[in-house]
Amino acid sequence: MEMGDYYYKPATITVSPGASVTVTLKNVGALPHNFYCDQINPPESSLVDAGKSADFTFTAPSQAGTYDFWCSIAGHKELGMVGKLEVK
Ligand SMILES: [Cu+2]
């Protein structure tokens, strides 16, 4: 998944309930970014600096549904850095 200023591409990812998921977060922007979702465990990736890439492994929610994820750096969510985690 690419992280830019201020977006995720793709903006939707689909996972199975309770799955262990690894996403590669590739920061193609000019600012640091991360991946945060209060319904996954752990809820937050490490900060990925501009031009860097990092793997983030989390456990998906056990309940099917669509959950928001976003960048937890102040202001980035408000600037549109939000995506959808589809669990089905
Ligand atoms: Cu950000």
Image (cartoon, rainbow, N blue to C red):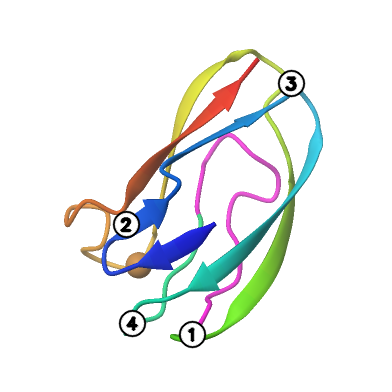
Q: For the residue marked with disc 4, what is the amino acid?
A: Leu
CA gap, disc 4 to disc 2?
Answer: 12 Å
User: Which residue is label 3 attached to?
Assistant: 17
Q: Are marks 1 and 3 in contact (CB under 8 Å)?
A: no
Secondary element at tag 1: loop
Which quarter of the picture shows residue 88? top right
Q: Earlier in the sequence, mark 3 or mark 4?
A: 3
Q: Earlier in the sequence, mark 2 or mark 3?
A: 2
Determine whether 72 is above or below 63 in the image. below
Q: Is mark 4 within 8 Å of ligand 1?
A: yes
User: Which residue is label 1 attached to?
Assistant: 49
Determine whether 13 is above or below 77 in the image. above
Question: Horizontal placement of 47 versus 5: left or right?
Answer: right
Q: Earlier in the sequence, mark 1 or mark 4?
A: 4
The magenta region covers 36-49
Q: Position of residue 21 (x, y in %)?
A: 76, 44
Q: For the residue marked with disc 2, what is the amino acid?
A: Tyr
Secondary element at tag 3: loop
Number of the front mark, 1 or 2: 2
Q: Earlier in the sequence, mark 1 or mark 2?
A: 2
User: Which residue is label 4 attached to?
Assistant: 31
